[in-house]
Image (cartoon, rainbow, N blue to C red):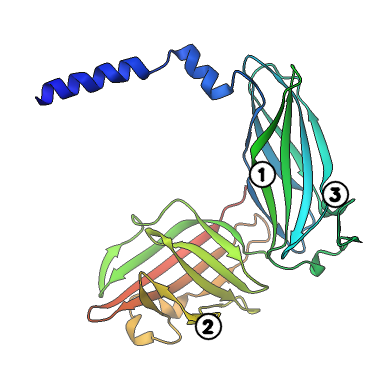
Amino acid sequence: MKIIKILSILLLSILVIPSCEDSEDVVTGVEGGLVEIANPSINYVVGNSGPYNVDLNVFQGEVKTVKIDIYKSFQTGDNKSNEVLFKTLEISDVETAKKSFQFSLDELIQDLTVGGNPLPDSDTEYLIGDFWSFRYVATTKTGNVVQQNQVTKITVATRFAGKYRFVEGTYYRIGVLTSAGDYWEDEYLFESIDAKTYKMNGVCAWLDQELYFQIEEDLSITYPLEWKGVAQIINDSPLITCADNLGDMQNSNCATSNYVIKDDVTGKDRLIMSFGYYTAGSGSREFYQVMEKIVE
């Protein structure tokens, strides 16, 4: 019976797998106008007016893309700006090609208004979380206009927001070393919440967990036990820190962690962090991690 089922599955697979030529049409788009946005999310760092870079992949099928119109807009809270044409990229490549363009603060704010008022010239007047959007519209040789599903979101952030990679660290479960790096993922996103607060998306192997932390003026790292009136938890258990629960954090290098190493040359800042959580009836879980900012 198992052999019959396997043969049936193989036969079905042969029937539904397209030829190489058909597959190429699916990837590149027979109708044309397919553009991949390599930078769907960019942090605009207050104090760095640019230029910033956006990369695109233009997939050329049987029908060629000849131009890409890029429209920009801005949003602060629930208030949205008008939308204007920012730039047009003329495409002459007949094969799939990479394209890029740059932008600065002056270019972002030009011709945009909110409530009839122009956008501020100084980036210090923007709120963390304000953002610009680039919307992409491709035109093919046949005149077909294709609205891309992807956009680029440029969010006002602070220096230490961005993507980070794990460099080194440890995870202790009830006093036993459980991981020295094999549980961590390749990269994690740290988001700006306000001038000093960040949200770390993903803790060790648990990418569905999040943690709010703060970078103080002296570059020390602290962890509020509550954020906006809600207790911080990891894996449904309360957060523990070196400052508040030192007795439960004996394996986390508390004496030599929870600070930032700035790299003003390459931008690869490092965050050395120790924190954990406590499971009732079981004990503490402790994390020590060195995270390095990814510079693209």
Rendering quarter of residue 53: top right
Residue flagged by tag 1: what amino acid is it?
Answer: Val
* Rendered image quadrant of residue 123: bottom right
Residue behind mark 3:
107
What residue type is disc 2 on? Gly
* Image point (67%, 16%), residue name: 63
- Residue at figure coordinates x 31%, y 15% from the top left: 14
The foreground one among 207 and 78 is 78
Name above or below for residue 78 compared with residue 38.
Answer: below
2 and 1 marks in contact (CB < 8 Å): no
Q: Is residue 103 above or below residue 7?
A: below
> Marks 2 and 1, Cα distance to the nearest angstrom?
34 Å
> Which disc, if any, is residue 151?
1
The residues tagged by marks 1 and 3 sit, at their Cα atoms, a distance apart of: 17 Å
Locate residue 124: give its quadrant: bottom right
Dot 1 crowding, Cα within 10 Å, few <14, some 14–19, many 20+? some
Residue drawn at point x = 74 percent, y = 16 percent: 142
Residue 235, compared with residue 75, is above or below; it is below
SS assignment at label 2: loop
Instruction: Give the label on residue 255, or none.
Output: none
Q: Are the residues at dot 2 and dot 3 in contact (C-beta closer than 8 Å)? A: no
Q: Is residue 151 visible?
A: yes
Under mark 3, the amino acid is Glu
